[in-house]
Amino acid sequence: MMNTTDKDTAKNAARKAAKLAMDDGEQRMASKFKTSWDVVLNFLIMSFCFSANHGTVSALIAVASSVQSKHESGANTSTLYFCYTFSSMFLANLFITKLGSKWTICLGLSLYVLYSASFLAAYYMGNSARWAVGLIATSISGFGAGGLWTAQTAFFSSSAKHYAALTGCEISRANSIFATIFVSFYLGFEILLKILTSLVQLKEHAVTVFTIFAIISASSALCCILFVRPVASVSNTPLTKDIIVSKVSAALRVYGTDKRITLMAPYNMLFGFASAFINQYANAEILPVVCARVFPLQREVTDLFILVLPLIPAIHITICSLSIHTIDPNILSIFAVFPQFVHDMLVLVDVRKSTLCIF
């Protein structure tokens, strides 16, 4: 057992270590947070805004093939992810360097509003106008949101250091606290908003749902702009070619030197293909047939069931997150991957024979 003096010594050492871990931008902002609650509240607001805004996009991507033609939804979703990937690879570091983590997050959330609002706008437009609005909105949203997760990681890291410096806990402990906060908000909103999209299947409620999603997306972006405080000041680093290409070159180096990344790559590629299959084909073509033939229920119940299957990964990831400190990591990794694989490969239906094959 540590006595009071030993505990105070350990806390002071942890505070000193946290301050030494801060960069110049974080140290300049340290005086803005007087108590640990200031840091936690600031992170809570960021997590709430980020999760609500990002949750609307994730939910709308899942339902896009149900409310748009397959070609239209495929073009919009692929454009969104292409621009998002390009921006994440080449522009994310540029955004962070010139805007800082807080304003990069605000930029991404604000431009995501265009994607959410495009569903509502397209509902009143003709076919040609819908295509144009969809492609423009997804292009802008994708480019703007490319730095979201890079900025979230930087904001997360800075918040944990500020918290550790104020409380005297280890930075690793602060990371666990803030990870729990963020995951709770992120998965909570993802589940709630995906359940809400079940009403989109009922055409008379589609406009209402799209309006709600647009309001949630816009209000969360505005809330982030107004109420979230920066956790690190913007650096005066001059723009160079290295800032733009450093992320790509670093990723390539990791692929060449870290075998764990190489082993994870096939699963990520599998997830990409399976996710596209689920969103673009299964949600629009397979699950409604399965529900109608295998579960001859009322329309509202059938629509709700369509949304239950995609929630399986979110639920099991939540269990993994809560169990990460009590379960052996090797067992946990198997538990985390297997339900996702089962979810992605669950349904293969021969509609003509009304056959449901489960792997």
Image (cartoon, rainbow, N blue to C red):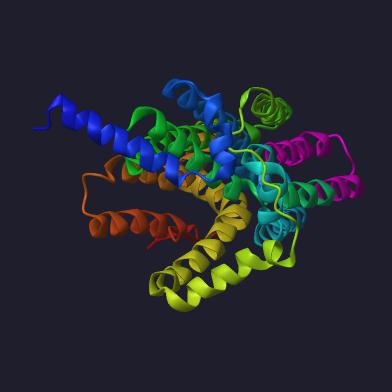
* Residue depicted at x 64% and y 28%: 224
Quarter the N terminus occupies: top left
Name the foreground residue: 99 vs 51. 99
Could you tell me if residue 38 is visible in this image? yes
Give the image quarter of residue 330.
bottom left
* Residue depicted at x 88% and y 50%: 132
Determine the main secondary structure of the stretch shown in magenta: helix
Quarter the C terminus occupies: bottom left
Where residue 285 appears, x then y in whole percent?
60, 53
Residue most toward the bottom? 256
Give the image quarter of residue 164.
top left
Where residue 121 appears, x then y in whole percent?
82, 35
Name the foreground residue: 95 vs 52. 95
Give the image quarter of residue 201.
top right
* Residue depicted at x 50% and y 27%: 44
Name the foreground residue: 113 vs 30. 30
* Residue depicted at x 48% and y 27%: 39
Could you tell me if residue 231 is visible in this image? no
Looking at the image, residue 346 sits to the left or right of residue 134; the answer is left
Residue 56: in magenta span = no
Stretch in magenta:
106-134
Q: Is residue 340 above or below residue 154?
A: below
Where residue 249 appears, x then y in whole percent?
60, 71
